[in-house]
Amino acid sequence: MTFPAPQRLAKWIAQSGYCSRRAAERLITQGVVSINGAVARHTDDVSALDQISVHGQPLPAPPALQYLLYHKPVGVDCNNRPDDPASLYQVLRLLPQRLFAVGRLDKDSSGLLLLTNDGGLSQRLMHPAYYHEKGYQVSTDKSISAGFIASMAAGVSWQLGETRYQSRRCRITQTAEQEFYIVLTQGLHRQIRYMCKALGYRVTALKRDRLHNLQLAQLPEGQMRPLSSAELHQLQLLSTLPQP
């Protein structure tokens, strides 16, 4: 568990849950926000050591940052619908602190999900400019050919409605007659399934076992664990380094 690093005042107010960032900016403009008794400015950076007030009322500090690794089973949908019994919401609501998933795995897939309340880290991990690696174990409905492996590695295109998608080059290794392991650096919707479909294959099982430096390893399905200090440090360090 860690506490938020110093950051701009409006973002701090928003992360406390008081209001949106845009609304916080309006409050600062109106002069109703103070830091340690002095009228705040938009350029002020604040931390957990500062006393922030809005309309004279002290603002609680944003909650401590949490990072959990969750092994999502098949059948759990990464939506946030309280009325859906299959929704990830049913898992998140049992946690003592409000967290969200970094990225998505479709309902028919299983594997690693990072759960956190660190919006800044989540944004960096999901942004395609950072080329963060994600590893998947995949089974298909028929024998895999050398041509299939070569085409997947070079990049595949597919059409959905009026939109055409193109996958980046990737690393892929055949691991059994109808199985392969693939490492992607982008996160298009149901990407691996559409890549396979474009080449005449159907995915029968898909499991993500790696996100950046995080490994699913032996974590049982349906269970979660906190990140170690070493895992978190490396994750935060690598997530600040965009690659060409």
Image (cartoon, rainbow, N blue to C red):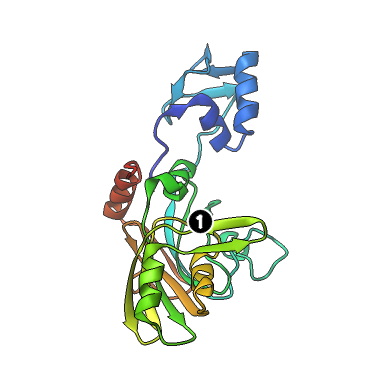
Residue lying furthest front in this view? 147
Image quadrant where one finds the C terminus: top left
Q: On the image, numbered disc 1 is attached to which residue?
A: 103
Identify the residue at image location x=46%, y=41%.
120
Extreme residue in the right direction: 83
Look at 31% across and 42% down and name the residue there: 241
Three-letter code, disc 1: Gly
Can you give x and y, in whole percent of width and height, for residue 127 in the image?
A: 46, 46
Vertical arrangement, residue 43 with respect to residue 187, above or below: above
Graded by Cα atoms within 10 Å as few (under 14), some (14 to 19) or many (20 or more), the crowding at tag 1 reads some
Where residue 13 appears, as percent x and y from the top left, is: 56, 30
Image coordinates for residue 221, horizontal then vertical, percent = 45, 75
Q: Nearer the viewer, residue 130 or 163?
A: 163
174 and 44: which is toward the camera = 174
* Residue 79: quarter of image: bottom right
What is the quadrant of residue 186 in the picture? Answer: bottom left
Indicate the position of residue 155 as horizontal and vertical percent values.
42, 62
Q: Is residue 54 left or right of residue 138?
A: right
Question: Residue drawn 39% across and 81% down?
Answer: 179
Q: Residue at x 49, y 85 (%)?
A: 141
Is 187 drawn above or below residue 73 in the view shown?
above
